[in-house]
Amino acid sequence: MRKISLLIFSLFFIVTATIAQEKKEKKKTQQGHIDQNKFRQMKDVLATPNDQHTASGAPGHQYSQQKVDYVMDIRLEESTNKIYGDEKITYYNNSKDNLEYLWVQLDQNMRADDSQTPLAKSGGAEAWLTLNSFKSKYLSESKGFGFNIEKVESNGKPLSHFINRTMMRVNLPKALAPGENFKFSIKWNYKINDINVDGGRSGLETFSDGNNNYTIAQFFPRLAVYNNVEGWQNMQFWGRSEWALEFGDYEVNLTVPADHIVDATGVLQNEKDVLTKTQRNRWATARKTFDKPVMIVTQKEAEKTEKGRAPGTKTWKFKAEKVRDFAFASSRKYIWDAMATNINGKTVMAVSLYPKEGNPLWEEHSTRAVATTLIEYSKLTFDYPYPKAISVHSERQGMEYPMICFNYGRPNADGTYSDRTKKGMLGVIIHEIGHNFFPMIVNSDERQWTWMDEGLNSFVEILAEDAYDAELFASNPAKDITRYMGGDQSNISPIMSQGDYVKQFGPNAYTKPAAALYILRKTIMGPELFDHAFRTYSQRWMFKHPTPEDFFRSMEDASGMDLDWFWRGWFYTTNVTDIGIKGVKPLYLTDKPSERVVKLKTQYKQYFDSLGDLVFITDKKEDANPKAMDQYLDGKEAPAYIYSVEFEKPGGLVMPLIVELTYADGTTEKQTFPSQIWMKDDNTVKRVFSSTQEIKSFKVDPDFETADVDVSNNSWPKKEDNKFDEFKTQVKN
């Protein structure tokens, strides 16, 4: 047996201090301090729980939320690239409050001619600009974007309203009491933006053949959230932080050119009116095919359609229940495929729409990636509740809506593509389809807390990508985030920051919270405990509005772990992980007590006599006697090698202490000490390691599990030129 535990007697004595001579100068009174221990509870940070958002993190017995239903007639006019809409809205006041007005989001006004969004951007003169960029910046060119609100009515009468940039206040004739509903209508139109020219999360892409790909979202006035946390969520839309929306039911009639293929949020109600008999038969086959996509519209058929322009229009009718938004895609260029996906006995359709420009990449991977995403996300959260999930191809988009998302990833003109292109395309599809879970179902406030949808989604995305192609997506999120965390602190914000003012939005909202949860699952909690807690949170807040407190509390409630230290460090600060080895002191077994021990034995004779036989440890190699314990071990080998290792923590984050020992025979052993090892001392801690053979080296965090930003201090003995130093250089550059 190479390693055994060594019984080491620790002596604790109460030493009575002698009273020193009175000093001539009066001792200065020390000032007190507040509790700054990294393990202090977060009761000073988290909102006080109540009967709607409970201390356990679950919705309370008084939890309520509003409901909004929409009936819409939408017309896409291809000749002018405009959308016309007439929507009838039913707003249900399920709160306990009387509402004097309603707030409606007008997202398209973000790019209106009088928008303040461009004025809020700081920047100097560029060395070069595209023609369109120059016109937009220096010629004040009017593009005519933004909503044209034609009328707002209730019962056929004009309804008082006021537009404040991207928000519209609808003034009610009388206060809307709890339990009541209010019906009104809005008629509107707007010009569709070209995504590749004007930017945007939705819009159109024009191909060289003159055809357009319409990926349309945020296209209708939508009711803002009113809740018990902050009242109306009527923050202006500046273009980055996304949307807080209410759930409801939708009935939508989409009138488009007759030769367009359309798909949208919800279930198609009139297949016979808009699909050919062949397409309907293929769709029926797809509903029963679970192993591969079935072509509903082939590439050959799409190429034939895109060469002409059919006269007239068709109206596609969709219904959706319990969704927070509605989006659609429309084009005559679409290839269309689908396959059935088994979600715990329920059939869900995985669907893709893409032009020939997306092939062969999209035909090979898109729908399969959709199916994998639904399966893997369902394992960690809840069974996907909607009937389908759609991936739509667009050159530069990556955006999500209920049941439908728009994704980039286009091969070269000759159909070839690199692994990088493939990885990017698969990554965005998995990510955007994953958003069906966060925030389309677990409906957090994206405008306020971006990480609650992007971060949680990016975390689950890591697991889904691994399931699809582990080799292609091989990564270490803990290691990958160190460059950001170890960067210039003036450019870093805590995760718990509103997205509009964050400087490095991607790492802050996506990769850092994803890495944090990855570490929490892999290194701190373990998959079994983490997965149960994460699933509990997800299921508690399906179709509801959770807050960060609900997430933090649910994770602790369902796991039985105090994680306040983790949330506080990772989410409320910009502290970093840096744990290293300060020093290693070899120790030896001996039968010779030190001078100090001899004095103690004399001073406390009665106590020492009660202990019986003693074994001593010394730092003097010349006094070593490896056989000092032989008579007590019944033939077992005593640990001849003992090391006192002092670890330091220059970084502000507390994390588990993971130590790899390398023995003289080349074998290694990893020991992990919980984060709580830092509870009593936030700077340094000591551990004693013993072995029957020499320990040649110690290494902290050998597998880069803790996001350590400086690994130059992680090894003993320290080597000047090793892979750790190389990694450190890469991180800091």
Image (cartoon, helix red, strand yellow):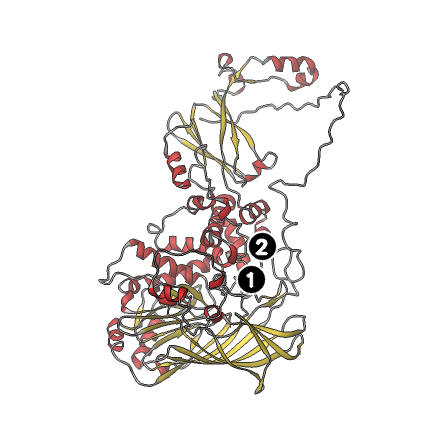
Residue 251 seen by the camera? yes
Which of the 4 quarters of the picture holds residue 210? bottom left
Residue 554's disc is: 2
Query: Is the N terminus in the top left, top right, bottom left or bottom right quadrant?
Result: top left
Residues marked 2 and 1 touching at CB (< 8 Å): yes
Give the mark, 2 or 1, whose residue is nearer the N terminus. 1
- Figure check: 460 above or below 198: above
Q: Residue furthest left?
A: 414
**What residue lies at 42% left-to-right and 66% top-to-bottom?**
201
- The residue that disc 1 covers is 541
Which is more toward the observer, 595 or 545?
545
Q: Secondary structure at mark 1?
A: loop
User: Which amino acid is tagged 2?
Assistant: Ser
Residue 382 seen by the camera? no
**Left/right of residue 699 with respect to residue 158 in the rendered view:** left
> Badge 2: few (under 14), some or many (20 or more) residues near its Cα, within 10 Å?
many
Expressed as whole percent of the image width and height from the top left, the position of residue 182 reads 60, 79
